Image (tube, rainbow, N blue to C red):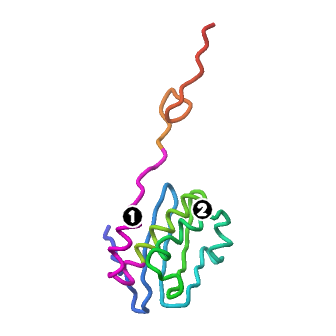
Amino acid sequence: MSTVEIPAVRSTGDALGTGRRKTSVARVRVRPGNGKVTINGRAADHYFVNEQDLNNALAPLVETERMNSVDVIVTVHGGGNTGQAGACKLGIARALKAYDSGLEPALRGANLLTRDSRMKERKHYGLRGARRGTQFSKR
């Protein structure tokens, strides 16, 4: 089976990026605009009601000072709020890097292009979870 390479910058001028965190996957599209951020068809502040998740997701735009010069469209699925915010952060950072390669030093310096590889450990045989054993009974 052959894999098809998807260009990072489309002919329309849109830059694409993919972000992953835990079990969440975010597909991000960055285009020139006036600062509108849409996540799954909703405004970012309506999608991430937790301030910490919102700030985490928009960190690349704040770090590169592109908050008012690009429009961002994100499609994210899987996982929970924190995982989705982390996936959005990585996807936006990668799309910004494709949009303007001069932003890479700022993004890398703020540690925004690093994939957080921590995943949930699988359940093991004979245990109640990944690490927790059964309760000991003396009698």
Residue wearing tag 2: 52
Residue at point 50%, 88% (across, down) = 69
Q: Which of 70 and 23 lies nearest the eye of the viewer?
A: 70
- Is disc 2 surrounded by few (<14), some (14 to 19) or many (20+) residues within 10 Å? few
Secondary structure type for disc 1: loop
Q: Quadrant of the C terminus?
A: top right
The spot of residue 3 in percent (x, y) is 33, 71
Secondary structure type for disc 2: helix
Quarter-wise, where is residue 46 in the image?
A: bottom right
Q: Which of 51 and 76 lies nearest the eye of the viewer?
A: 51
Mark 1 vs 2, N-terminal side: 2
Residue 45 on the magenta span:
no
Residue wearing tag 1: 111
Please give the count of numbered marks on the rendered protein. 2
In the displayed structure, 120 sits above or below 74; it is: above
The residue segment tinted magenta is 96-120
In the rendered structure, the answer to whether residue 60 lies left or right of residue 102 reads right
The spot of residue 35 in percent (x, y) is 56, 85
Residue at point 53%, 65% (across, down) = 56
Quarter-wise, where is residue 36 in the image?
A: bottom right
Q: Which of 53 and 106 lies nearest the eye of the viewer?
A: 106
In the rendered structure, the answer to whether residue 48 lies left or right of residue 76 reads right
What's the CA distance linking mark 1 and mark 2?
17 Å
In the displayed structure, 63 sits above or below 117; it is: below
Q: Quadrant of the N terminus?
A: bottom left
